[in-house]
Every structure is written in C-alpha cells, then in structure tokens.
Image: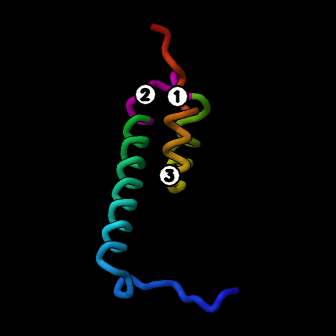
Amino acid sequence: MSGKKKKSWKDMTPGQRAGVMIVGAGQMALLVAAQRSISKTPEAQIRGSKALWRAASFINFFGPLSYFLFGRRRGTA
C-alpha cells in the first residue's frame, strides 16, 4: 500500500471540487434518465427484466450506459 491518504473535501482545490460535482451530476442524470426510460418503455422492448435493469442502473456510469446500449431493443422503422 502507498503512504497516500485519501483527500477529504476540504483538502481539494476548488477545481477538483468542481470536477467531483460535475461527474456526480452526470452520474445522477444518467441514473434518472435510465430509471425514467425503464418505467416508460414497454417490457417487450427491453432485453431481460425491468427489475434487473433497475438494479443494474445503480452501478456507477456502467449500469445506465449498459442499459442504453444493450438493454433496449431497437425498433423496426
């Protein structure tokens, strides 16, 4: 293990704090968008169960992005 300790909020520079806030807001936006999409999309247009995708969407960035990339069936035009 290295001798570095984790930085607390007060140890961060204003730029680092802003970065954390931006990343956090982006993550929350993806989560809300995925949850809303899961709610509004008919079960037949989702690969797998809605409950599974709801739970997976809470995994940082990976879950909501996976849902949008792989969880929804593509409609025929």
Q: Is residue 65 left or right of residue 30?
A: right
Q: Which residues are magenta?
A: 38-46
Circle on res. 61: 3
Q: Amino acid at mark 2?
A: Thr
Q: Which residue is mark 1?
A: 72
Q: Residues within 10 Å of mark 3 (few under 14, many from 20)?
A: some
Above or below residue 38? Residue 44 is above
Q: Nearer the viewer, residue 2 or 21?
A: 2
Which tag, 1 or 2, sits closer to the chain's start? 2
Measured in 3D between alpha carbons, the distance from the residue under mark 2 to the one under mark 3, in whole angstroms, is 20 Å
Q: Position of residue 15 (x, y in %)?
A: 32, 72
Q: Nearer the viewer, mark 3 or mark 1?
A: 3
Q: Nearer the viewer, mark 2 or mark 3?
A: 3
Q: In which quadrant is the N terminus drawn?
A: bottom right
Which element carries disc 3, helix, strand or loop?
loop
Q: Amino acid at mark 1?
A: Arg
Q: In which quadrant is the C terminus drawn?
A: top left
The question of residue 36 being in magenta is answered with no
Q: Nearer the viewer, mark 1 or mark 2?
A: 1
Q: Position of residue 25 (x, y in %)?
A: 34, 57
Q: Residues within 10 Å of mark 1 (few under 14, many from 20)?
A: many
Above or below residue 19? Residue 45 is above
Main secondary structure found in the magenta portion: helix
Q: Are marks 1 and 2 in contact (CB under 8 Å)?
A: yes
Q: Are marks 2 and 3 in contact (CB under 8 Å)?
A: no
Q: Are marks 3 and 1 in contact (CB under 8 Å)?
A: no
Q: Position of residue 76 (x, y in %)?
A: 49, 10
Q: Which residue is mark 2?
A: 41
Seen at 54% across and 28% down, the residue is: 46
Which element carries disc 1, helix, strand or loop?
loop
Q: Is residue 10 left or right of residue 63?
A: left
